[in-house]
Each structure stands twice: as structure tokens, then as C-alpha cells.
Image (cartoon, rainbow, N blue to C red):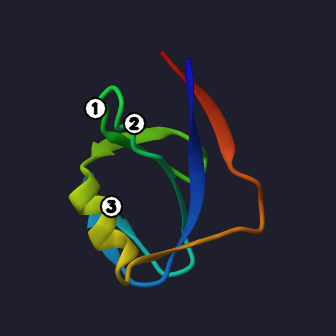
Amino acid sequence: MHIRSINKYKVIKRFSLCKKMYDISETIYIQEQDLTHGEPQKVFSDEKEYLTDISSDVYECLRKGFIISDDREPSIQTNSQ
């Protein structure tokens, strides 16, 4: 069983995802991609509520100027089956 991390990110530029606007300094959580099983990345709110799946292309775009890693807290680990 593969364990997928859920990483914490801080918003540095406003964007909209899943009909929600994210403002600067908000926090979102994104689960790492599962290349073995082809599962999409999952996005969670600051309250750790599931919001939507995103493709690796969308994730890469977010990492290029919209979100940055927030390493102040450890990542969350989840089991993937």
C-alpha cells in the first residue's frame, strides 16, 4: 500500500478553483500525485475538507506563481489503496 502525502501551500496570488476564489495568505492542501495508479491529485480546504481533483498540469501552473510550500507544519499522510 502506497502512502501519499498531503502538502500544505500558501496562496501568494489570487486564483479561482472549484468555484471558489482563493486570496493571498490563504492555505490549501494538495495531495501528491499517484503515478503508479494514475489517480489525480486531490485539493483540500484549510479546514481539510475535500474540494476537487486537479491534473498535474493544473498543479504545475499553480506552483508557478500562485502557491508556495508552507513548511511550518508537517505534511499529512494518507493511505492509498
Q: Where's residue 15, x and y in %?
A: 31, 74
Rendered image: mark on residue 34: 2
Question: Residue furthest toward the right?
Answer: 73
Rendered image: mark on residue 55: none
Residue plotted at (36% across, 30% down):
36
**Is the N terminus in the top left, top right, bottom left or bottom right quadrant?**
top right
Q: Is residue 37 left or right of 1 when viewed as pictured?
A: left
- Secondary structure of residue under mark 3: helix
Rendered image: mark on residue 59: 3
From the image, tell me which residue sits under label 1: 38
Q: Is residue 52 left or right of 30 when viewed as pictured?
A: left
Q: Looking at the image, tell me whether mark 3 or mark 1 is earlier in sequence order.
A: 1
Front tag of 3 and 2: 2
Question: Residue furthest toward the front?
Answer: 36
Count of numbered labels shown in the rendering: 3
- Neighbor class of circle 3 (other Cα within 10 Å; few <14, some 14-19, many 20+) is some
Q: Amino acid at mark 1?
A: Gly
- Neighbor class of circle 1 (other Cα within 10 Å; few <14, some 14-19, many 20+) is few
- Along the viewing direction, whichever of 30 and 15 lies nearer the viewer: 30
Residue plotted at (37% across, 43% down):
41
Q: Amino acid at mark 2?
A: Asp
